[in-house]
């Protein structure tokens, strides 16, 4: 078997399933550490989980430094003055430049957080692999190859969509040059290059975060499946378990649930910053797409059509990623609630065994103190966040439409007037 196939069919741990995400983040400077396995010390209990360590190698430092320079170049480059030369109001120019600056700083801070919290990352991997080991003891293994394939598919889909977006925007740019006689501006081209770079890093990091959430969701689904199988389904004659085996399984399920909740909390504390800023990017792109589509009904010039094509396609990509993000976050919360439901059903069915009921009640109390929630500290990633985002898009769209009607040359109206002046003054 060739090395690629041997690698693909020998995925056997959480660390290996996370490798595609780690490599993608490292390529963009957002994962400036190297995580390696060392040789386990024989005879020590739990040695198999203590073979991971983080290192900061020379190439990690080089990649980190190069990308920090790229992210922070806006603080030193001369092209930000292009924003103040745009034919829009000063407010819109400041907001646009602020978004560019925030995108670069966000990437820089995210990389620094991973570097600072590398011990937390190692602890997260150990917690999940300990939970996987308990799953194997319960005769139910995690489908690591399936999770690995999903992570690779997410990343491949993100890169493909970004490639299609770039082709679309190049086509739109060429169309504008041919139809509106817009002159080429080297400073503006540099600004767009910076935008494409930061957007690619941003989308890739959010996609990697989604892959991690998918991995956690599969484990909670497996946990609930095992709870149903061992405590709610009527056992056959060949799988009747003793009381000691049932008590041991409850203890194992409690440890699995606790480890997964702690791992999700650590995972969010390290990587949640990019998804938070991503929500702001979604709001901005959706509002601009709404304004552009609204202007089609009053003026269908090529410039408006180009803005609709650019902002609508970006909003579609961001909306798809946001849907996956809140869907997986809501699934994790729902599976946590489902675990509690299954435990209480098991308590009702085990009423004739006081020792078993007592252990299940302790598990139930444990569920009240730990929940698998994807949160940044300010809000949770679930469907309530989706409703809040939709409300924010509607609110800001109405506000900007009012400014567009009341303030001369505010945003799109200013761009249209400037384009008409350029065409009129061109020989």
Image: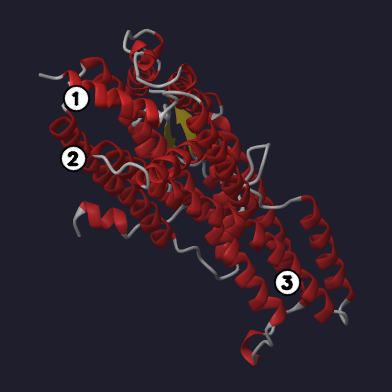
- Could you tell me residue 426's position as x and y percent? 14, 19
In percent of the image, x 50 and y 23: which residue is there?
A: 109
Determine whether, in the image, residue 43 is placed left or right of residue 68. right
Q: Secondary structure at mark 1?
A: helix
Q: Residues within 10 Å of mark 1 (few under 14, many from 20)?
A: some
Q: Secondary structure at mark 3?
A: helix
Q: Secondary structure at mark 2?
A: helix
Q: Residues within 10 Å of mark 3 (few under 14, many from 20)?
A: some
Circle number at residue 328: none
Pick whichever, 125 or 184, lies toward us.
Answer: 184
**Residue 119 visible to the viewer:** yes
- Could you tell me residue 163's position as x and y percent? 25, 43
Pick whichever, 403 or 81, lies toward us.
Answer: 403
The quadrant the C terminus occupies is top left
What residue does disc 1 label?
423
Among the two numbered marks 2 and 1 on one chain, the one whose residue lies closer to the N terminus? 2
């Amino acid at each position: 078997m060739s090395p690629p196939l041997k690698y693909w069919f020998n995925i056997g741990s959480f660390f290996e399933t996370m490798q595609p995400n780690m490599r993608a983040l490292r390529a963009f400077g957002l994962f400036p550490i190297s995580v390696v396995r060392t040789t386990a010390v024989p005879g020590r209990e739990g040695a198999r989980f203590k073979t991971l360590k983080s290192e900061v190698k020379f190439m990690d430092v080089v990649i980190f430094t190069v990308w920090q320079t790229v992210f922070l170049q806006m603080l030193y480059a001369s092209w930000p003055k292009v924003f103040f030369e745009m034919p829009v109001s000063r407010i819109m120019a400041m907001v646009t430049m602020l978004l560019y600056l925030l995108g670069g700083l966000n990437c820089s801070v995210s990389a620094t957080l991973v570097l600072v919290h590398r011990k937390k990352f190692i602890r997260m991997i150990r917690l999940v692999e300990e939970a996987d080991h308990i799953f194997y003891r319960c005769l139910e293994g995690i489908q690591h190859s399936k999770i690995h394939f999903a992570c690779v598919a997410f990343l491949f889909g993100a890169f493909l969509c970004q490639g299609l977006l770039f082709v679309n925007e190049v086509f739109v740019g060429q169309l504008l040059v041919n139809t509106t006689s817009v002159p080429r501006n080297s400073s503006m081209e540099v600004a767009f290059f910076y935008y494409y770079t930061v957007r690619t890093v941003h989308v890739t990091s959010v996609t990697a975060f989604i892959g991690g959430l998918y991995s956690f969701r599969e484990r909670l689904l497996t946990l609930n499946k095992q709870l149903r199988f061992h405590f709610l389904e009527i056992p056959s004659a060949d799988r009747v378990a003793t009381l000691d085996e049932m008590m041991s399984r409850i203890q194992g399920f409690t440890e699995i649930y606790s480890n997964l909740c702690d791992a999700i909390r650590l995972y969010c504390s390290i990587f949640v910053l990019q998804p938070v800023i991503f929500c702001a990017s979604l709001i901005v792109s959706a509002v601009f797409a709404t304004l552009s589509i609204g202007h089609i009904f009053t003026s269908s010039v090529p410039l408006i059509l180009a803005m609709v094509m650019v902002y609508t396609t970006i909003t579609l990509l961001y909306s798809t990623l946001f849907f996956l993000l809140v869907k997986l976050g809501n699934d994790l919360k729902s599976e946590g609630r489902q675990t509690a439901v299954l435990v209480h059903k098991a308590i009702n069915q085990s009423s004739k065994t006081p020792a078993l009921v007592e252990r299940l009640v302790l598990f139930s109390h444990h569920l009240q103190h730990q929940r698998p929630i994807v949160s940044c500290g300010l809000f949770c990633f679930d469907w309530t966040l989706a409703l809040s985002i939709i409300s924010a898009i509607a609110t800001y769209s109405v506000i900007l439409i009012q400014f567009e009607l009341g303030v001369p040359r505010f945003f799109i109206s200013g761009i249209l007037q400037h384009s008409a002046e350029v065409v009129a003054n061109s020989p």
